[in-house]
Image (cartoon, rainbow, N blue to C red):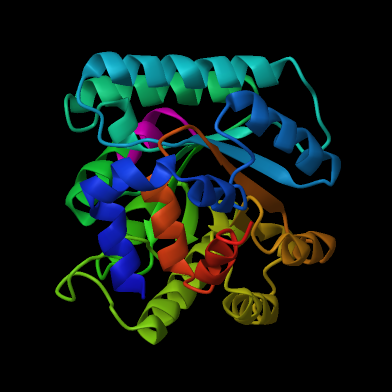
Amino acid sequence: MRSVLLWMAANERLARAIPRTRFARRAVRRFMPGERVEDAFGAAERLRDERIGVLFTRLGENLTSLDEADAVAAHYRGVIARDATRRHVAGPIEVSVKPTQLGLEQDVEACRRHCSDLAARAAEAGSWLWIDMEGSGLTEATIDLVAALLEEHDNVGVAIQAYLRRSAADVARLLPLKPAIRLVKGAYDEPAAIAYRDGTEVDANFLGLALIVAEAARRGEARLALGTHDVALIEQIRSLTEAQGIPRAALEVHMLYGIREQELRRLRDAGHPAFSLVAYGSAWYRWYMRRLAERPANVLFALRQLIP
């Protein structure tokens, strides 16, 4: 099922056809409040009223020109500025961007300038800039980008994919720079030569990486976020970190909007900083199919949308 869904995510013909269907647009509402940034801000108000932090990500990737990248950067500047006029007990909205949206494949230096500018603006608002991880062909360039940003800013985070065999080395490289790290399992179809294909191996690597970063977080030298809906894995990490004397406040939980919200509230009430990643935008098809691939049980929900 996972392989089929990832194939669908990469299929250009399906990417053009499926988003036009009513059932697909109904199904995606589970994972995003709407396509407009206004929809995202509306969801953010509700979440922050519940003491749940919010991250925004505008969907889209692999742009073809720097003009498009400039427009994406301008959009995020507007988001940061708009939210800066509001003060909320759950803190400011944090921004999570794909580096290809900001020109990584066209001009690495232009991408770095955009990211550096957004990090500086986020810092002024008391917020953070997160760099998402994409396919393995971009991992090295993304790690290089994040390392360069951390030399200039102390409010930059990155997603690290536990299914990649290289991730332990990437974490070791970044930890001296006091990063924020959001651990995720990974949502692309990568070959066994560079990625763990067995779920048990992915979970084991996720656990090991979490314990390494958690120790740095205890010393105030890192920020750790568990970016997973796998509650059993979260509980295992909680038990081990508590046994090591690591405070719950050092172990954040980041989940997608609309997914396992009751569990996110429970973890918030247990003392863990809880965040919801709110996605929006019209380019949702590939992102949505990868979300289904991460947890194929969600396919049942999507199929129910076929019923009027």
Residue that extends furthest to the front in the rendered view of this protein: 308
Q: Where is residue 300 shown, x and y percent of the image?
A: 55, 71
At 60% across and 76% down in the image, what residue appears? 237
In the picture, measured across the screen, residue 4 lies left or right of residue 232, that is left
**Left-right relation of 83 to 230:** right
**Which residue is drawn at the image coordinates 58% and 58% (left, top)?**
305
Check the picture and name the quadrant holding the N terminus: bottom left
Give above or below for 294 relative to 256.
below
Report the label total: 0
Corner quadrant of residue 91: top right
Q: In this view of the protein, can residue 132 be seen by the observer? A: no
Could you tell me which residue is drawn at 84 percent across and 62 percent down?
A: 269
Which secondary structure is most common in the magenta stretch?
Answer: helix
Q: Is residue 278 above or below residue 291?
A: above
Residue 176 coordinates in the image, percent (x, y): 39, 50
Q: Nearer the viewer, residue 4 or 122?
A: 4
Front one among 65 and 267: 65
Q: Is residue 85 visible to us here?
A: yes
User: What x and y, as percent, mark residue 74?
Assistant: 44, 14
Question: In the displayed structure, does residue 42 sit left or right of residue 216?
Answer: right
> Quick check: is 103 in the magenta stretch?
no
What range of the chain is rendered magenta?
Answer: 146-154
* Residue 113 falls in image quadrant: top left
- Residue 220 point in image, percent of width and height: 60, 52
* Quadrant showing the C terminus: bottom right
143 or 220: nearer the viewer: 143
Q: Is residue 62 above or below residue 205?
A: above
